[in-house]
Amino acid sequence: MLRLSKRVEYGLIALRHFASIEDHSVCTAKEISQRYNVPHELLAKVLQKLAQARIIQSYQGVRGGYVLLHNPKNIKISDVINAIELEKPMLAECFAQGPESCYIFDECTIRRPLGKIQRNINNFFHTMTIAEII
């Protein structure tokens, strides 16, 4: 079954947290880690990737941390997945690895129906925003 990685889950948790802060104040990885009981080191790496993708802004120093750079209505779930993961979530191995990974690729009777489902999932991730999970 299609599964999002823990990294994506933690990224979504953090973005939901940032979006719920009314005064848009800076929040640290440690605060989020403690509040939601997620591993600090992994969350910090995820936040770095989100900052590199310009989804959040990183501030250094004693009062440092992270803030959301965009309105949650403008951050698509696919943007988050693409920022965090090198490999996108796929239903079938042949979609992720290519036709050479499947010895029945040419004769496969479910490849096209699964492809349709995969396109619908991709479209869903591309249209759903962080605002919808707040």
Image (tube, rainbow, N blue to C red):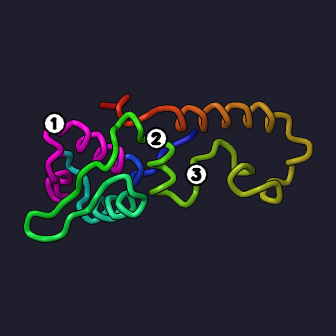
Image x and y of residue 55, in percent: 37, 52
In the picture as drawn, the residue positioned furthest to the left comes out as 62
* Residue indicated by mark 1: 22
Q: Which mark is residue 88?
A: 3
Segment tinted magenta in the rendering: 10-35
Q: Nearer the viewer, residue 102 or 130?
A: 130
**Whole-number angstrom distance, CA of label 2 to CA of label 3:** 12 Å
- Asked which secondary structure carries label 1, the reply is loop
Residue placed most toward the observer, 28 or 38? 28
How packed is label 3: few (under 14 Cα within 10 Å), some, or many (20 or more)?
A: some
Count residues near mark 1 (Cα–Cα under 10 Å), then give few for <14, some for 14-19, many for 20+.
few
Q: x, y percentage for residue 82? A: 51, 53
- What kind of residue is marked 2? Ile
Image quarter of the C terminus? top left
**Label number found at residue 30:** none
* Helix, strand or loop status at disc 3: loop
- Describe the element under mark 2 as helix, strand or loop: helix
3 or 1: mark nearer the eye: 1
Amino acid type indicated by mark 3? Lys
